[in-house]
């Protein structure tokens, strides 16, 4: 009998059942996207008029929504890339920002996929390579809702993997992504929810897309063909769930207030230095943003009280903060802002010194077009000083470039929490970052899974071009993970670049190619490594409900640490039936 990784995605279905309870109102569902401390001036709070309030002179919002009134404004991300309040502001927003889910009402689409995989190095060893044939059975279900009260996108597809020659590797890989936004009381009381499950290499050192046709893809390695290319012993199952009830109230031209709390749970089945980890947290957030009464000025006051319990560094942790940001619109598309506040952060049980410090930040925000924005700031928080940037720019009607530079103090699981706080889906049902619109990456296959407190800095650059029959994309990621004193763990840094091309051969056939190259350095553990990945896939629609696919992937890692160098070849063929 295959071994199933710890954890359960059942909470997603309980949340989906709760969210589907009331659907009769005439007001469209709108998600909570409060002011982010980045200088944007069009207040993104929902109001009784269906638009945005506190607009000043800048209009950075993207209207849309699923009804006849305006949607929320475009989210721009935290000022410093931290877990600063409110973490939940992006949940469920992208279906609104992108113009709504494609089909009104409810859609339930069961699927089943059968893949056959050949792997010539199932244990990822430098010597004594062992090959095997792996049968991957993936039942799945996709549920979407686009109603006046509810936006929901839920995808669940667990993969059962059966090894022909090595039954000890039989396993079930849980794969889940769900994001929902519910209106309980129109213009007043809302609920957001997310659910997530994916597989990632425990010791990192991997780049490139997972092979195989089954699975969900986009938000973590191991979602294509289950744990494609990795043994049970070298993978970690990651789960995350959150639910956020919140209140919004508009005081007309004076401003808008909101109050919400996020209850979240994240867990991992394994880590590089000691077993399963988990965090259960509650994050209470309040905010008041002034309205047009101040003219070109906008004042935003934010408060947060965060509490977490769990294993390792999070046996008893807290974060309290208060911040006042004042901005001024120089013109309709350019704003400058400054913020001052105080924070009290403690990681009990971690050995990390508490932080009791004044915070400050200055910066500007520019909106050169309806689909373009850039925010750059410099400031001090979480015990250090540095820059932050977030932007997306439409170079042409077909080409978009996005950039993000963030700095945060967190654990591995808190990074997952932060990713889920920005989760959404696009009009095709693909899990994406609601800030940039790019594929959501909640787990990073290049980094080892640790249970400590670190300072993370991440630079992401993505260029995408959409042609009539082709999609071209290039992405660059640079991440550093520096453990704080006393928390243990290893420093690590990685730089990866990926180029991909998808071509529509005809209405029934699509071919995709991807090339990735990167480096990772983990002194004292896996040393320095260079990484290379090449993959290609052909998909063919045999009938309106049946598709076939064939793919090949090559991965190579060269390491300065003996025994960590590896290469493997993976071949997949598969069928998917949609009901």
Image (cartoon, rainbow, N blue to C red):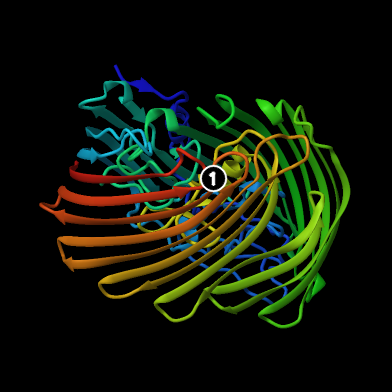
Rendering coords of residue 367 (x, y %): 62, 76
Which image quadrant for residue 55? bottom right
Instruction: Identify the residue at image location x=43%, y=42%.
Output: 177
Instruction: Identify the residue at image location x=77%, y=55%.
Output: 288
Q: Residue 204, relative to residue 30: is it above or below?
A: above
Instruction: Identify the residue at image location x=35%, y=53%.
Output: 104
Which sits in the foreground, 335 or 125? 125
Which sits in the foreground, 25 or 485? 485
Rendering coords of residue 387 (x, y %): 73, 64
Which sits in the foreground, 479 or 403? 479
Query: Which quadrant of the rendered structure holds the N terminus?
Result: top left
- Whether residue 309 can be seen here: no
Rendering coords of residue 553 (x, y %): 29, 51
Instruction: Identify the residue at image location x=15%, y=55%.
Output: 540
Q: Mark 1 — residue? A: 447
* 253 with respect to 371 (left or right): right
Q: Residue 415, relative to residue 77: is it above or below?
A: above
Rendering coords of residue 433 (x, y %): 51, 55
């Amino acid at each position: 009998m295959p071994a199933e990784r710890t954890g359960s995605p059942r909470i997603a279905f309980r949340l989906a059942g709760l969210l589907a309870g009331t659907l009769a109102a005439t007001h469209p569902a709108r998600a909570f996207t409060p002011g982010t401390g980045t200088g944007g001036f069009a207040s993104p709070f929902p109001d009784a008029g269906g638009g945005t309030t506190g607009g000043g002179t800048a209009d950075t919002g993207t209207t849309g929504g699923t009804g006849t009134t305006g949607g929320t404004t475009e989210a721009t991300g935290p000022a410093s890339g931290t877990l600063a309040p409110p973490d939940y502001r992006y949940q469920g927003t992208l279906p609104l920002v992108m113009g709504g889910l494609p089909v009104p009402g409810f859609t339930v689409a069961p699927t089943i996929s059968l893949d056959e995989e050949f792997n010539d190095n199932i244990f990822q060893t430098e010597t004594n390579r062992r090959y095997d044939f792996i049968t991957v059975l993936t039942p799945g279900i996709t549920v979407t809702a686009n109603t006046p009260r509810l936006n929901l996108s839920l995808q669940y597809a667990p993969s059962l993997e059966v090894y022909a020659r090595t039954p000890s590797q039989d396993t079930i890989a849980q794969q889940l992504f769900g994001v929902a936004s519910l209106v309980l009381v129109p213009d007043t009381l809302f609920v957001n929810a997310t659910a997530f499950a994916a597989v990632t290499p425990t010791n990192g050192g991997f780049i490139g897309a997972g092979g195989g046709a089954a699975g969900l893809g986009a938000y973590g390695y191991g979602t294509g063909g289950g744990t494609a290319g990795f043994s049970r012993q070298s993978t970690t199952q990651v789960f995350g769930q959150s639910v956020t009830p919140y209140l919004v109230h508009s005081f007309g031209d004076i401003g808008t207030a909101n109050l919400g709390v996020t209850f979240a749970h994240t867990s991992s089945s394994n880590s590089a230095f000691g077993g399963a980890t988990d965090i259960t947290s509650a994050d209470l957030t309040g905010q008041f943003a002034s309205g047009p009464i101040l003219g070109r000025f906008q004042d935003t006051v934010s408060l947060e009280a965060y509490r977490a319990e769990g294993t390792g560094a999070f046996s008893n942790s807290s974060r309290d903060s208060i911040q006042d940001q004042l901005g001024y619109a120089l013109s309709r598309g350019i704003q400058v802002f400054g913020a001052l506040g105080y924070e009290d952060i403690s990681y009990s049980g971690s050995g990390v010194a508490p932080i009791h410090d004044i915070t400050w930040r200055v910066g500007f925000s520019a909106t050169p077009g309806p689909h373009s924005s850039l925010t750059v700031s410099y400031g001090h928080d979480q015990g250090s000083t540095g820059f932050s940037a977030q932007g997306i720019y439409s170079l042409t009607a077909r080409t978009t470039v996005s950039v993000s530079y963030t700095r945060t103090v967190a654990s591995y699981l808190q990074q997952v929490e932060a990713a889920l706080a920005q989760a959404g889906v696009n009009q095709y049902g693909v899990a994406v970052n609601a800030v940039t619109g790019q594929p959501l990456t909640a787990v990073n296959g290049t980094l080892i899974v640790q249970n400590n407190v670190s300072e993370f800095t991440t630079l992401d650059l993505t260029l995408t071009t959409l042609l009539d029959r082709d999609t071209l994309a290039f992405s660059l990621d640079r991440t550093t993970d520096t453990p704080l004193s006393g928390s243990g763990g290893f420093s690590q840094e990685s730089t990866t670049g990926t180029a991909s091309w998808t071509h529509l051969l005809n209405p029934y056939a699509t071919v995709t190619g991807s090339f990735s190259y990167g480096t990772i350095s983990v002194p004292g553990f896996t040393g320095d490594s260079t990484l290379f990945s090449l993959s290609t896939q052909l998909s063919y629609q045999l009938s309106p409900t049946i598709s076939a696919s064939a793919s090949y992937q090559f991965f190579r890692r060269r390491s300065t640490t003996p025994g960590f160098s590896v290469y493997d070849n993976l071949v997949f063929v598969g069928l998917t039936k949609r009901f």
